[in-house]
């Protein structure tokens, strides 16, 4: 078993959070999975970003058990484990308390699709799962947070491969992607879209969701079978 690659990727991805202004102090964590070995690398709990090292990353299996590492893993580790266990194609997960996305989570509101920046990434509002019920909170809290996310996607017919982000009510956002770079990118996009939507409602409290024709046009420009955004590689 060799965990060097995921340790490095998890380290680099975690370091992107302060660089992108997505975390204050230690309010965030990124994990990166190695599906072949059945494990993920995650930030150690409560360690400042400027003290992090690739070798500090804790290796955990998809049941949330530590496989290798001298430090305790992030307190959110079980949420990551549940998502990896149920969503086979997720390669990395990010949790932050980024300012604007968290403000929407605290307001218990989906982020309405107000503009093309949002539509370039997804064709739905950014979902906000309800706050967890008392039984879930009193039980295995971090583990149940994962189920709160899974259940919301199931109940609303959402596909985690199309919608790579969610707000957990009264808490904060979680994003994911095929690798650390994409999951962190989604976290930054979410924060930017959340800020834009908040400003939109401040400028015009009666702002309306963007019309379907524009939503479709923008999403397909980037992601459809005839996409023409960027360069052919
Ligand atoms: Zn949190």
Image: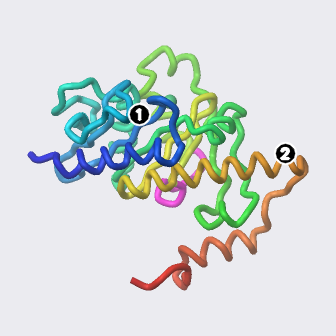
Number of marks present in the image shown: 2
Q: Which residue is mark 1?
A: 79
Q: Position of residue 210 (x, y in %)?
A: 78, 63
Q: Position of residue 60 (x, y in %)?
A: 24, 35
Q: Quarter of the image containing the N terminus?
A: top left
Residue 102 lies left or right of residue 82; in this view the side is right
Residue 33 lies left or right of residue 103; in this view the side is left
Q: Nearer the viewer, residue 66 or 201?
A: 201
Which disc, if any, is residue 232?
Answer: none
At label 1, counting other C-alpha atoms closer than 10 Å, the crowd grade (few under 14, some 14-19, many 20 or more) is many
| Label 1 close to label 2 by CB (< 8 Å) | no
Q: Position of residue 80 (x, y in %)?
A: 38, 38
Q: Which residue is mark 2?
A: 202
Q: Position of residue 208 (x, y in %)?
A: 84, 57
- Magenta stretch secondary structure, dominant: loop
Residue 189 lies left or right of residue 231; in this view the side is right
Q: Is residue 154 visible?
A: no
> Which residue is rendered at x = 66% and y = 53% of the image?
193
Colour convention: rainbow
Q: Nearer the viewer, residue 37 or 100?
A: 100
Magenta-highlighted residues: 155-163
Residue 157 among magenta residues: yes
């Amino acid at each position: 078993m060799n965990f060097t690659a995921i340790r490095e990727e998890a380290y680099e991805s975690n370091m992107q959070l302060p660089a992108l202004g997505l975390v204050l102090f230690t309010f965030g964590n990124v994990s990166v999975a190695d599906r072949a070995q059945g494990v993920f690398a995650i930030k150690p709990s409560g360690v400042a970003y400027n003290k992090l090292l690739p070798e500090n990353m804790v290796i955990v299996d998809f049941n949330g058990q530590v496989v290798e590492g001298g430090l305790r893993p992030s307190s959110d580790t079980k949420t990551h484990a549940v998502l990896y266990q149920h969503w086979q194609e997720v390669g990395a997960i990010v949790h932050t308390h980024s300012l604007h996305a968290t403000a929407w989570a605290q307001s218990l509101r989906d982020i309405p699709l107000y503009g093309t920046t949002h539509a370039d990434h997804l064709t739905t509002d950014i979902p906000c799962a309800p706050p967890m019920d008392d039984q879930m909170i009193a039980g295995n809290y971090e583990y149940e947070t994962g189920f709160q996310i899974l259940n919301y996607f199931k109940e609303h017919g959402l596909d985690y491969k199309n919608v790579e982000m969610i707000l957990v009510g009264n808490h904060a956002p979680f994003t994911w992607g095929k690798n650390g770079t994409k999951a962190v990118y989604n976290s930054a996009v979410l924060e930017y879209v959340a800020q834009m939507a908040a400003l939109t409602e401040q400028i015009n409290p009666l702002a309306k969701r963007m019309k379907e024709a524009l939503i479709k046009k923008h999403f397909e420009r980037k992601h459809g079978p005839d996409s023409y955004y960027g360069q052919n590689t």
